[in-house]
Amino acid sequence: MDGNRRDYLPRMVDRQLDELLQQLPGLMVVGPRAVGKTTTLTRRASSVVRLDRAAEAAAFQADPDVALRAFEEPVLLDEWQLVPEVFAAVKRSIDRGDGANRFYLSGSVRADWHSGVYPGTGRVQRVSLFPLSVRELEGRVGGRAFLDRLAAGELIPSPKVAPDLRDYIDLALRGGFPTAALDTSGRSRRSWLESYIENLVTHDVELTPGGGSGRRIGPERVRRYFESCALNTAGVVDHRQIYETASVSKQTGEAYDDLLDRLMVIDQVPAWSSNRFSRLVKQSKRYVVDPSLVGAVLNLDSDGVLADGNLLGRIIDTFVVAQLRPELAISESRPRLYHLRTKEGRQEIDLVVELGGGRLLGFEIKAGATPTRSDSKHLAWLRDQVGDRFVAGVVFHTGPMVFQLEEKIIAAPIASLWS
């Protein structure tokens, strides 16, 4: 999607970007490499500077303030983290004033603010862009967010056309990277994804702050660590287990965790907490950001996923979360994503969404097509514990119909998220 081979495919975040640019002087769009950041911002910019190109970066390395003034605004500074002095120049220019919609910064590495405080507060708004959801791939970015519909108590209808289990696996392995999902198929798509991982563990790691300094990080060791993360995607796993699976020390594992987090290919969903519950697990749930990367790094096709019940559940869970991430940006109910698990393991809920005012949605994700009331028992437990704060619960499944399971709890096809 960073090329010009097709018309622009609207993103759910577009509306948020346009609203912010009416009032703010700068935007920083962050996300994994190749999710469409450059394309999304280029169509809004009058000037584009590619700081991953030595010739264009040279002037900014010499004097970023002078270099910045040479470009017509709004100007896009792509891969700005490669010349971090650029950010300070943008900040100084904004402080001098001159209105809204002036600077766009995009990057594939999460910045490490040594002060612990984001220095662009009030000047440059950060927005996250993720791989395409099925809703975006199908051009259905209009209308209300699924989370807002649930929060408002709207009836969720059964999809007119519902995928089956294999269809969902195919969608998951297709993934949401624009070039892979839209321009390739079959062997070409697999080759693109494998190349993505190869670049991730070699080129991208070396360019990450801290990744290329000191002791050299071997690509094969990073690949093995990423494989371990993929095997445990959608899991609350002790870090030590991942380190042991990847055959790395605790110190090395922590360094790799930091690198993959900065490259935004691993996403941590925090544990939900409440003063009313004293025995909740506090450990985050770890996800590979797009299920297509799980398939590629583990060399899995649809048959391979179907043959492994453990990976099947993890792929489906990872796929659902990938559909929800873009929804968070457009939802008016200001949702935050968590998971819930008690220390004894007696209650576990795949996803808890906290809305404004402390209201809660709960989601269970099942690979089966015929969920029963037993599949909703943990959602019913949460409903009974928090009372009116519990707005709705959904057991997502791979069957075709929406139906009631319990009070405030429905079973719904995963396709309800986009249809």
Image (cartoon, grey):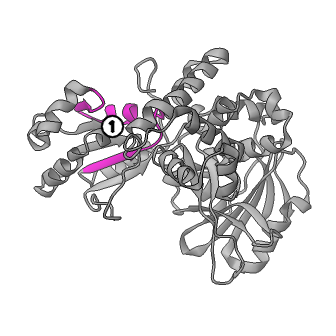
Asked if residue 102 can be seen in this view, the reply is no
Q: Residue at x 42, y 42 (%)?
A: 215
Up-down relation of residue 196 to residue 63 (above or below) = above
Up-down relation of residue 347 to residue 139 (above or below) = below
Quarter of the figure with residue 247: top right
Quarter of the figure with residue 176: top right
Q: Nearer the viewer, residue 210 or 294?
A: 210
Asked if residue 175 can be seen in this view, the reply is yes
Q: Nearer the viewer, residue 396 or 338?
A: 338
Q: Which three-letter amino acid code belongs to the residue tagged 1?
A: Glu
In the picture, the quarter occupied by the C terminus is top right
Query: Is residue 259 located in the magenta-colored stretch of the structure?
Result: no
Number of residue marks? 1
Quarter of the figure with residue 407: bottom right
Up-down relation of residue 272 to residue 210 (above or below) = below
Q: Residue at x 23, y 51 (%)?
A: 25
Question: Which residue lies under the disc numbered 1?
Answer: 79
Task: Tell me residue 146's x, y (percent).
Answer: 63, 52
Task: Tell me residue 359's x, y (percent).
Answer: 62, 72
Query: Is residue 30 located in the magenta-colored stretch of the structure?
Result: yes
Q: Nearer the viewer, residue 49 or 311?
A: 311
Up-down relation of residue 192 to residue 331 (above or below) = above
Looking at this rendering, what residue extends furthest in the left direction? 66
State left or right for residue 13 relative to residue 136. Answer: left
Question: How many residues crowd around disc 1 within 10 Å: few (fewer than 14), some, or many (20 or more)?
Answer: many
Q: Secondary structure at mark 1?
A: loop
Numbered range of the magenta stretch: 26-53
Task: Tell me residue 332's x, y (percent).
Answer: 51, 60
State left or right for residue 28 relative to residue 323. Answer: left
Q: Residue at x 75, y 48 (%)?
A: 157
